[in-house]
Amino acid sequence: MHLPDMQHPPLAGNACECRLTYHDGTRRLVYCVDQEEPFPDGRLIVSRTNLGGFITHANEAFITMSGYTVEELIGAPHHILRHPEMPKAAFADLWTTIASGKKWHGYVKNLRKDGLFYWVYATVIPNVRAGVVVSYTSVRRKPSRRKINEMSDLYTKMLSQERAAQ
Amino acid sequence: MKLNFMVAPDFSPDRFAGWHMVNTLLQSRSGLQLHLLTPASAQEQSELLRRDAVDLIYANPFDAAHLIRDLGFRAFARPMGKPDEMVIATAAASPLKRLEDLRPGSRIAVTDNRDVKLIGLRLLEAADLTDKDLQWVLVETFQAGARLAIKGEVDAAFFLAEIYHTLSRITRSQLKILIESAIFDITHVLLAHQRVLSEVPAIMAALAGIGQQAADHEVLDALGIPKGFAVMQEEEAEFMVDLMDTLLD
């Protein structure tokens, strides 16, 4: 599914511009603002996708944090939240892990509709019904500042390696 | 046929009468004989389950996963408007102002409510704290945890939110909340063992009907579930179990 280009965030004159290419070959222009939206205390962000990674359920915290409406999220690919500062290797690991029926954990920097970002600690599990994987559930929790700093440094290195290899 | 109906031991003591009232109503309206079991601890609950002595159970979400996936229970109802949330609180006079002020080595009062501890541990990740970083002080009741926190014998205490908010006003005035979960998707569930599934429609009809007669509200208020119960589909329960699974580590 081809996502439309992001609209330039109205309140962010200094937004950086980037054209992302997703795993399915589709491309999208996104804008990033160097401003973090804090993860809401006490909440969990919950979503569910079908086997193709298209969103079928989003809880209230997901809708609020993403900045999109529920109508925009349902049916959209989960990579609608992909931040350009996330290395592709992290998502490749996610999909390889859950496709083999295992649980995946990882720290993710997400891109909001308004260009701001938010960090999560994500767990993705395959939903097994009668022995068959039918969908995936993703639950995101609030990460500590120490882990965010650590992962931010790691992802910066991974990203520069990926760019150098291109 | 007599069915054993067990209620998980994590309700406030003042709800005890409410469960007996519900049990009486369910019996009279379903025509089934129900024997109410109210184990005093998680260990006692486990022992009853091990003896295969339970037909119906009002289970906490942590136990629901094991009951559904491993022991052959099936969800059929859940309380409406009553998600399971937890509170981490400290003494009102404590220098701690927010969750991130807790440090490794902090003493935390905790009951044997595994779902409360699990959710609390997930919230503490934001403070960079794990199970092994903390000193756990096991207490019998949430009220005992509140007393330890007020006296400064622990840095904080874990509470089932519902119980925290029913503590006396004077107790709550001596505590302050560091964080309260707002997950919404996790609730207790009513489960039936496979061997009694044929009885579920009669029980569900009686359960869903509680609240439709004027006097029923007294029962639901006594139970702390004023909106009553709603049907829970199997997939809704599976979704909640999947969600709990993501919180295990």
Image (cartoon, coloured by chain):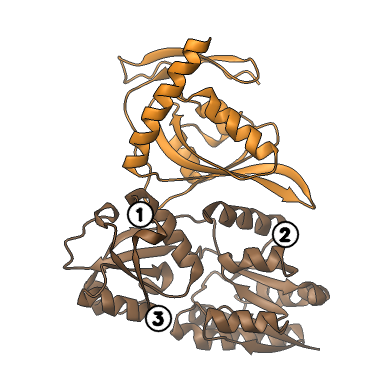
Q: Is residue B193 left or right of residue B87?
A: right
Task: Indicate whether B86 appears above or below B167.
Answer: above
Is A103 left or right of B169, judged from the image as shown? Answer: right
Q: Amino acid at mark 3?
A: Thr
Callout 3 crowding tier (Cα within 10 Å): few <14, some 14–19, many ≥20:
some
* Up-down relation of residue A9 to residue B138 (above or below): above
Q: Which mark is residue B141?
A: 3
Q: Position of residue A22 (x, y in %)?
A: 59, 19
Are the residues at dot 1 and dot 2 in contact (C-beta closer than 8 Å)? no
Labels 3, 1: front one = 1
Q: Quadrant of residue A92?
A: top right
**What SS does tag 2 mark?**
helix
Chain to which mark 2 belongs: B
Amino acid type at circle 2 is: Glu
Residue A1: image x %, image y %? Answer: 66, 21
| Residue denoted by label 2 | B234
- Residue shown at 50% from the left, 26% from the top: A82
- Chain in brown, by letter, is B
Residue that label 1 marks? B129
Q: Chain of mark 3?
A: B
What secondary structure is marked by label 3? loop
Q: Which chain is orange?
A: A
Front in this rendered view, residue B131 or A4 = B131
